[in-house]
Image (cartoon, rainbow, N blue to C red):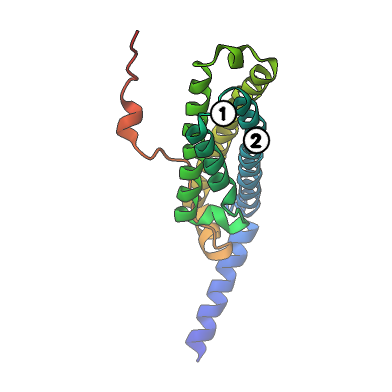
Amino acid sequence: MSMIVARMVLVSLLLTGMLTSSGCGYNDLQGLDEDTKAAWSEVINQYQRRADLIPNLVNTVKGYAAHERETLESVVQARARATNVQITPEFLKDEAAFKKFQEAQQGLSGALGRLLALAEQYPNLKADQGFRDLQSQLEGTENRITVARKRYIEKVAEFNKMVRYFPTNLTAKFLLHLDEKANFTVADEKAVAKPPEVKF
């Protein structure tokens, strides 16, 4: 019985020592956890901005290219899939859900690319001021998404280092029950590494 009490006292002293030492990282880990959540919120904010622009873009293209129904429907369906993924605080801990979200966003990016390429076939659509404004806003949003994702990647890297480095890994694991966070990945790294083919 006294052995169990001695172990409990030892564990209590170790925890107290960790919390009172400057190297335990308790506050740093809490701060980085909040930073990653805020950075992720900005990524979601920019994806939502893009999703909000799509109906206007589709409607503008419809006026000029109504018979391109398949392309228009694929954009609408891709938007529905991308906005259908439920984002909760636990989402960042679930790698499978995170991957599903990424795939939906990549699908939407591909569908938008096909829609914008379609505009090349319609000179009147390309000349339409409303279409040009929407296209410009969409391009700006894509840039904002890239910046937001970059900031999130940096914050996750910083957080994951703290979770893995000693002695803060002890605080992360035993006191806060924190694990590494998922980060953005590329579905097909070989395809991305291959230079694009340019034909004239």
Q: CA distance from mark 1 to mark 2?
A: 14 Å
Q: Which residue is mark 1?
A: 66
- Tell me where residue 143 appears, x and y as whole percent: 58, 25
Label 1 element class: loop
The front one of 18 and 194 is: 194
The front one of 139 and 98 is: 139
- Tell me where residue 12 appears, x and y as whole percent: 59, 72
The quarter of the image holding the C terminus is top left
Circles 1 and 2: CB distance less than 8 Å?
A: no
- Tell me where residue 88 appears, x and y as whole percent: 62, 56
* Residue at 56% over, 40% down: 76
- Tell me where residue 8 appears, x and y as whole percent: 55, 79
Q: Which residue is mark 2?
A: 55
Label 2 element class: helix
Q: Is residue 52 left or right of residue 185?
A: right
- Quarter of image, res 193: top left
Is there any visible trace of residue 118 in the rendered image?
yes
The front one of 139 and 162 is: 139
* Residue at 33% over, 20% down: 195
Which residue type carries mark 2? Pro
